[in-house]
Image (tube, helix red, strand yellow):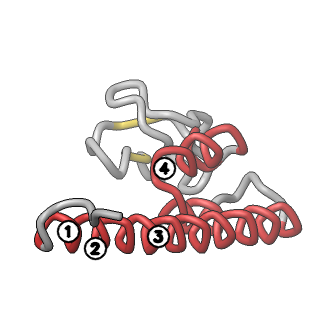
């Protein structure tokens, strides 16, 4: 007997040859949507920073060497952002101390 394939998102009937659901437009093959492509991962990295790393490893489009390169770049971006946030914290702490001590010191 022929089993009817349904969309995992909207549960409408879809054809076996379809890559995307004609009703909701979502990908029928996990790991093959736009966000799993090179351009999608770069866009996600610009928006999410190192939190885009799961998209890299869930992708079925990108090769393993490319996944390692993206991982290295995203980890470097994460370290850079952490150091930048630490420096911002120190600047804010210094500014707070100056304000609490009555402003700028006199020479």
- The alpha-carbon separation of the residues under discs 4 and 2 comes to 68 Å
| Crowd band around label 4 with a 10 angstrom C-alpha radius: few (<14), some (14–19), many (20+) | few
37 or 77: nearer the viewer? 77
Question: Could you say whether the residue bearing mark 1 is in a helix, strand or loop?
Answer: helix
Q: What residue would you read off at disc 4?
A: 2
- The alpha-carbon separation of the residues under discs 4 and 1 comes to 71 Å
Q: What residue would you read off at disc 3?
A: 87
Identity of the residue furthest to the right in this view:
65
**Dot in front, 4 or 3:** 3
**Dot in front, 4 or 1:** 1
10 or 57: nearer the viewer? 57
Give the residue at x 33% y 26%: 23
- The alpha-carbon separation of the residues under discs 2 and 1 comes to 5 Å
Q: Quadrant of residue 78?
A: bottom right
Query: Mark 4 or mark 3: which comes first in sequence?
Result: 4
Q: Residue 91 placed where, x, y %?
A: 37, 66
């Amino acid at each position: 007997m022929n089993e009817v394939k349904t969309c995992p998102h909207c549960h409408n009937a879809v054809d076996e040859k379809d890559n995307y659901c004609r009703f909701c437009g979502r990908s029928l093959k996990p790991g093959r949507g736009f966000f799993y492509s090179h351009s999608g991962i770069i866009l996600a990295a610009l928006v999410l920073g190192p939190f885009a790393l799961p998209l890299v490893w869930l992708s079925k489009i990108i090769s393993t060497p490319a996944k390692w390169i993206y991982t290295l770049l995203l980890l470097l971006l994460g370290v850079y952002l952490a150091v930048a946030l630490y420096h911002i914290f120190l600047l804010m702490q210094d500014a707070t101390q100056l304000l609490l001590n009555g402003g700028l010191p006199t020479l």
